[in-house]
């Protein structure tokens, strides 16, 4: 309330004192400086990094100070430090060996300049004033605890002269150099575009049993502690930089510019630089959610797709925010990588890469889908932050399930697109909308590869040709099956409770399973034992289906004893349905029979036996039988055998698909003729 005074009455000291007292009462307590926001995470691994990019040699030179606090219950007698770029040092690395198992030998003919590495020059424990307390370089060694590969250089260990007790802090200073590999598997350089990820020496995670730090495998992603990143990147002047966090300052010096970015409560830091980027900005705002400043670093040839990138990011921020919990950082950077850079579709805290093409027809979710997916990772990978090296499905699968639902709700229509001439020319089939259950959950990929491993296998140890079928697609189909069994309302509560309870806490699979049982109020061990802890697959089928007038013949009781007789019922049809479980997986299913008069009969079966017969006596014939008619069990690998009909429609189906294929072939030939 404003103070209203008579100016003519303010002449004496008493009046001034009275006025001062009134103003003080109106103002209340003396205003305090706003308190710093409470930490979202433990912030026990903090990095202060200074790095310089040399485009002429495609190299980095850096210095970092790591402040690490032991959150465990036992002393740390050593440190584990990742050197991820050594995966591209030579073809003997564990990463490239695993990739080769899947048939990808990308470096077989690579020239010398395509290989990359990280090399530590110095590593020391330091005091608060920066003086050296203990030099660790003499005791630094490469280790290979996972596959005992003596040639792998992606993980190091150094014994500490004095152990770090629980609650104590360690300060490390590391200097290193890094040589960029060719732009390969989401990092590296192509032309004057640099995408810089997994680029600095990085600590493992110290847990109850000691260090969790694995070698770098092609299958797995990453795991690290939360902290504060304060990073200064020196690049050629005029080059645009995008990075985790927000820019604090720019300093020019002799043809270079140093960009300082800072971010709290994250577990990684990635950046990119190029003179070719064009920048677009937009602000996400939605009732009930905090605003987010979106920054898009776009290739010039994709300038017309800026709105589509923003739409994908906004869909993730809105729907994930409403369903699970708000995105807390206030900013998000989207990087559009250049053609053939192999750096698209990867997530990092507050920054991710999308992926599009020069020709991208509207009405198909490309680039919206990849932007939505990577923005969605900010919630699972970014905040919940489970151990993706061992349990990648807790991020990838939950995210694919979620983004698939967002696509179905917010990004429609979404038509099939096929690409020709080296994936350059798209053709959109506007009569084939993609379906959530089968297409955006990638059912066809899972169907082919679903039994290669159990989902509980550590992600880094999954068969390299099928790890996506497990971590992404099987998990999404598992969750979608639970949704159809319990409802979306229940599954939304499950994921919201899991997100709220475990963000910034590194959960394990059993933590997720416990939330499922808590929210549903039902045991699910029978379900997860099969889908998570085994490689069982599911397939229920109609093995036999007929509907005939019942008759009998043979010896029957009569007044004179047994006598041969033949009988035929009148006004009745006996329908027999035999349902078989063809695979090891067990799931309760319904059986639905439809009769000629439109009536239906439904039976429930626990699905445990290998087969079961159902019999119905009705005055009309049956026309069709289905097992799992609502398709609750989306993990069923062969849905074509789930139904049978007594009025075959093969001729009509053949005509329909023949005509479609003729039209598609005609379109293909016309397109070919146009370009040739």
Image (tube, rainbow, N blue to C red):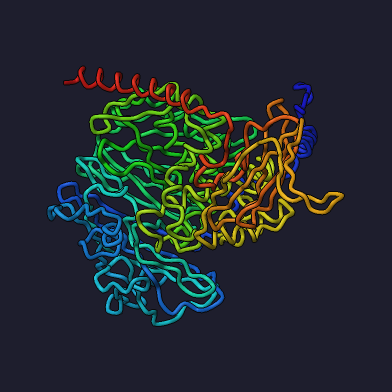
Instruction: Name the spot of residue 4 as percent of width and height, x first.
Output: 78, 24
Residue sitting farthest toward the bottom: 161
Image quarter hosting the C terminus: top left
Image quarter hosting the N terminus: top right
Residue sitting farthest toward the right: 559
Instruction: Name the spot of residue 105 as percent of width and height, x first.
Output: 22, 54
Residue sitting farthest toward the front: 560
Say if residue 210 shows up in the picture: yes
Q: Quadrant of residue 62?
A: bottom left
Relative to 119, does residue 381 appear above or below in the rendering? above
Q: Residue at x 72, y 55 (%)?
A: 522
Query: Depth check: 214 or 473 in front?
Result: 473
Q: How many marks?
A: 0
Query: Depth check: 172 or 519 in front?
Result: 519
Instruction: Name the spot of residue 144 as percent of width and height, x first.
Output: 33, 72
Relative to 369, does residue 301 appear above or below in the rendering? above
Q: Quadrant of residue 353?
A: top left
Instruction: Name the spot of residue 421 as percent of width and height, x first.
Output: 23, 30
Q: Residue at x 36, y 67 (%)?
A: 81
529 left or right, relative to 134: right
136 left or right, relative to 332: left
52 left or right, relative to 549: left
Query: Depth check: 342 or 475 in front?
Result: 475
Query: Depth check: 638 or 511 in front?
Result: 638
Say if residue 13 shows up in the picture: no
């Amino acid at each position: 309330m404003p103070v209203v005074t008579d100016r003519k009455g303010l002449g004496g000291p008493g009046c001034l004192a009275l006025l001062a007292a009134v103003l003080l009462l109106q103002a209340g307590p003396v205003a305090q400086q706003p308190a710093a926001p409470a930490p979202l995470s433990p912030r026990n691994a903090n990095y202060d990094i200074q790095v310089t990019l040399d485009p002429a040699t495609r190299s980095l030179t850096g210095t970092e100070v790591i402040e690490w606090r032991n959150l465990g219950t036992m002393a740390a007698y050593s440190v584990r430090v990742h050197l991820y770029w050594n995966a591209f040092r030579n073809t003997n690395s564990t990463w490239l060996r695993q990739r080769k198992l899947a048939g990808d030998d990308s470096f077989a003919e690579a020239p010398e300049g395509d290989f990359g590495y990280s090399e530590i020059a110095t590593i020391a424990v330091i005091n608060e004033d920066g003086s050296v307390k203990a030099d660790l370089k003499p005791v630094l060694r490469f280790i290979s605890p996972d596959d005992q590969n003596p040639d792998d250089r992606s993980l190091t260990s150094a014994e500490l002269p004095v152990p770090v007790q629980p609650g104590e802090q360690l300060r490390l200073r590391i200097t290193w150099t890094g040589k960029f590999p060719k732009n390969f598997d989401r990092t590296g350089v192509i032309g004057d575009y640099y995408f810089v990820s997994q680029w600095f020496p990085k600590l493992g995670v110290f847990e109850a049993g000691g260090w969790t730090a694995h070698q770098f495998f092609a299958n797995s992603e990453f795991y690290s502690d939360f902290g504060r990143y304060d990073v200064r990147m020196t690049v050629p002047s005029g080059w645009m930089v995008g990075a985790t966090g927000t820019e604090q300052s720019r300093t020019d010096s002799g043809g270079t510019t140093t960009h300082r970015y800072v971010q709290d409560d994250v577990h990684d830091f990635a950046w990119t630089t190029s003179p070719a980027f064009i920048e677009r900005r937009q602000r996400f705002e939605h009732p009930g959610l905090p605003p987010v400043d979106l920054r898009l670093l776009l290739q010039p040839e994709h300038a017309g797709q800026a709105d589509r990138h923003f739409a994908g990011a906004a869909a993730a921020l809105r729907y994930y925010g409403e369903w699970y919990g708000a995105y807390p950082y206030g900013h998000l950077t989207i990087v559009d990588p250049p053609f053939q850079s192999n750096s698209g579709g990867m997530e990092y805290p507050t920054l991710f890469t999308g992926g599009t093409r020069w020709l991208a027809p509207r009405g198909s979710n490309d680039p919206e889908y990849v932007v939505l997916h990577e923005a969605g990772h900010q919630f699972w990978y970014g905040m919940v932050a489970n151990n993706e090296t061992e349990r990648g499905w807790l991020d990838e699968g939950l995210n694919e399930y979620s983004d698939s639902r967002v696509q179905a709700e917010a990004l429609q229509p979404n038509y099939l697109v096929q690409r020709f001439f080296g994936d350059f020319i798209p053709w959109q089939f506007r009569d084939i909308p993609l379906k959530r259950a089968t297409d955006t959950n990638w059912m066809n990929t899972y169907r082919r590869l679903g039994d290669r491993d159990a989902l509980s296998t550590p992600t880094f140890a999954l068969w390299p040709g099928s790890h996506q079928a497990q971590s992404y697609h099987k998990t999404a189909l598992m969750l979608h099956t639970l949704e159809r069994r319990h409802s979306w309302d229940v599954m939304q509560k499950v994921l919201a409770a899991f997100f709220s309870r475990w963000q910034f806490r590194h959960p394990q699979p059993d933590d997720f399973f416990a939330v499922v049982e808590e929210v549903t109020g039902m045991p699910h061990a029978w379900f997860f034992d099969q889908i998570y802890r085994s490689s069982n697959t599911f397939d229920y089928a109609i093995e036999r289906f007929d509907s005939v007038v019942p008759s009998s013949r043979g010896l029957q009781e009569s007044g004179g004893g047994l006598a041969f007789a033949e009988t035929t019922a009148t006004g009745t049809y006996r329908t027999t349905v035999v349902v078989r479980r063809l695979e090891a997986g067990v799931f309760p299913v319904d059986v639905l029979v439809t009769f000629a008069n439109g009536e239906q009969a439904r039976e429930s079966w626990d699905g445990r036996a290998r087969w079961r017969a159902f019999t119905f006596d009705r005055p009309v014939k049956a026309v069709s039988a289905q097992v799992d008619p609502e398709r609750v069990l989306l993990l069923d690998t062969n849905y074509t055998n789930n139904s049978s009909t007594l009025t075959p429609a093969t001729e009509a189906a053949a005509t329909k698909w023949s005509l479609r294929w003729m039209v598609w072939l005609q379109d293909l030939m016309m397109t070919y003729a146009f370009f040739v």
